[in-house]
Amino acid sequence: MKREADQVGPEGRQGLAVLGATGSIGVSTLKVVALHPDRFEVVALSAYQRIEELGALCRTWRPAIAVTHAPEAAEALARSLAAEGTEVWSGPEALERAVCDPRVTTVVCGIVGAAGLKSAWAAVAAGKRVLFANKEPLVMSGHLLLALARESGAELLPLDSEHNAVFQCLPPGRPGLVQSGVRRILLTCSGGPFRNTPASEFARVTPEQACAHPRWSMGRKISVDSATLMNKGLELIEACRLFEARPEQVDVVIHPQSVIHSLVEYVDGSVLAQLGNPDMRTPIAHALGFPDRIEAGVARLDLASVGRLDFEEPDEARFPCLGLARAAAIAGGSAPTVLNAANEVAVEAFLARTLPFAAIPTVIESVLAMRPVVAVESLEAILEEDRRARDAAREAVIAQGAKGVWAC
């Protein structure tokens, strides 16, 4: 871990780059930052398509840099921000330039999917403090990112509520799970909107139903992942990467109240849990302030009002994505990259109403069976496996569509 003096800018404040600033993670991050103007300075903000929202954020925060995807949008944004002194850059390379800017000390990675891989990689290579809300870079290249962090001196901290909870329950310094006396990690799961829905009804599930999460307000892609439990499968792989755990050391338990965010079981029978209201500002504040505790603006947890805490085993027969993810974690190599790519293509097709909800795991399983597991020891190798898996997944989606199984 870096010395605290290395984590602040010249005025004693952390210089923040918030990637995906208009998404739920970005918005929650800026709410926490607003409570601590003496600790944080917003240096860079990025958004993919929500240009008007990005412009509004820039007028509020006046960052030195704003990044968006399309050059045309960047030109329009630059004109609207001419009086603010914000430079507007465009394209994926611009994200990499932004996170490497010397004014940036802390990078919040909130870009959904594999699209956030290169910028996360650049931030780690530059030795920044990197806060991961998007799990895909760690799923796809976690072993390489950890090795790169050791070389560059970067500090990796989890923003995902489950992994942040595990981080809080592990001993300081985390010399390794075995040395710390850890038996297993338990990731909690709300169960999603279809926890009690019979599998026979999955063929008729609409994108609107899948995106109606019972506990969290999230983007459409991650909401669908939560509905299929693939989100928990990706988190299982991420936990193996972050905490250097074996897949058999990571279990999932359904906890509908979403008050316990994860647990760590020790060999002496002790189980430590992190509790809190289901609000992403809590893990965000923990990671932003670490090792200090800072105000998050979250309501206090009233256990008497909660009343009860329920737990149940996930049904992998109804939610096969969880088992597919565990199998990919065990296989290692390119398998997690292939799993993630196939899932992204399948979810995109479902949201476009060209693939039924029930066929999402079918597409993923077919691509995993088609692609051989190979070693991936470079960013280029990972990107190539990602490309090939996406091509295979698109073919699988077309094959499913040819069967005429979309029921809505």
Image: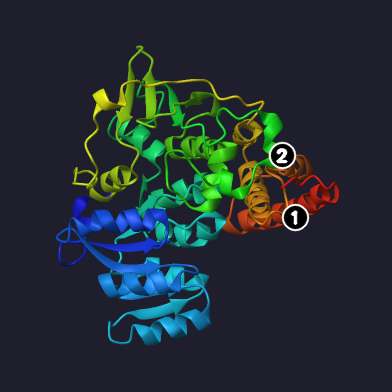
Q: Residue at x 33, y 15 (%)?
A: 270
Element type where label 1 sits in the image: helix
* Pointer 1 residue: 394
Judging depth in this view, the residue of 221 and 244 nearest the camera is 221
Rendered location of residue 66, percent (x, y): 38, 74
Residue 284 located left or right of residue 24: left
Amino acid type shown at disc 2: Ala
Residue 46 is drawn in which quadrant?
A: bottom left
Element type where label 2 sits in the image: helix
Rendered location of residue 142, percent (x, y): 50, 46
Crowding at mark 1 (Cα within 10 Å: few <14, some 14-19, many 20+): some
Rendered location of residue 152, percent (x, y): 38, 55
Tag 2 and tag 1, C-beta contact below 8 Å? no
Q: How many angstroms separate mark 2 from mark 1 (CA)?
A: 19 Å
Crowding at mark 2 (Cα within 10 Å: few <14, some 14-19, many 20+): some
- Residue occupying the far top of the picture: 268
Judging depth in this view, the residue of 178 and 237 nearest the camera is 237
Q: Residue at x 46, y 73 (%)?
A: 68
